[in-house]
Image (cartoon, grey):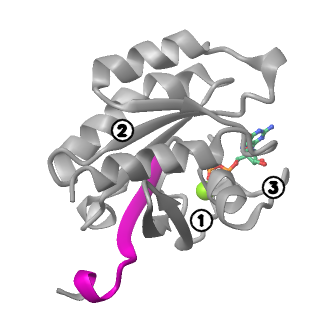
Amino acid sequence: SSDDEDPKLKKKVVIIGNSSVGKTSLLLHYTEHRFRSTLESTIGIDYREKDLVVSNQEVHLQIWDTAGQERFKTITRSYYRNCDGIIVVYDVTQTESFEQVKGWVESVHKYAEEEVPILVIGNKIDLSSKRAVNERQGKELAKTLGTEFIETSAKTGVNINFGFEMLTKKMLLRN
Ligand code: GDP
Ligand code: MG
């Protein structure tokens, strides 16, 4: 197969979650080390690519962003097509976005391939004075849903690389 000739594995990741939780910002920070505080939350960026090495394996990630359709809950089967990993983001300052993580994970089970690894991200931890969901709640939810979990800030960049590496390792276990 072409995978034998090209040692670099190609993997598709999709990012979902409520509007304005920081999906586009996480992707921009991860791939371009940029953060924009004025980012219009309805704007998405199709996808970005990123090369990384985990467990001595070169991996080429293609990471898809929503184009704002999450506002209308109109993300459909085609968005999840052939995806190898999923990131569900909530905002630790917005309880509602946390409460809807379960619904997002259910849509993954409905539309994506079975057993696709899922990483739940609690984002915006730099806004500590506004925090409404603590880390323990996030961990417990992830445990209940059978997903990985991490907290990040797309503003400071904390834990973003670690999160993508964690998900990529999970994806490689399925090869
Ligand atoms: P999306 O709708 O999920 O793609 O969310 P965006 O990435 O568009 O972010 C929505 C708003 O939250 C923007 O104003 C971002 O600048 C801001 N934002 C995103 N992530 C963070 C973060 O980690 N910390 C802070 N303070 N603001 C963030
Ligand atoms: Mg967006």
Of the image marks 3 and 2, the number of the one nearer the N terminus = 3
Residue bounds of the magenta highlight: 3-16
At 58% from the left and 43% from the top, the residue drawn is 162
Of 19 and 157, nearer the camera is: 157
Give the quarter of the figure containing the N terminus.
bottom left
Residue 5, image x, y percentages: 28, 89
Whether residue 74 sits left or right of residue 129 in the image: it is left
Dot 1 beta carbon under 8 Å from ligand 2: yes
Q: Amino acid at mark 2?
A: Trp
The residue carrying mark 2 is: 104
Mark drawn on residue 44: 1
At 80% from the left and 61% from the top, the residue drawn is 34
At 64% from the left and 64% from the top, the residue drawn is 43
Of the image marks 2 and 1, the number of the one nearer the N terminus = 1
**Front: mark 3 or 2:** 3
Q: Amino acid at mark 3?
A: Phe
Q: Amino acid at mark 1?
A: Gly
> Could you tell me how far apart the alpha carbons at marks 3 and 1 are, in whole angstroms?
14 Å
**Front: mark 3 or 1:** 3
The residue carrying mark 3 is: 35
* Residue 6 counted in the magenta span: yes
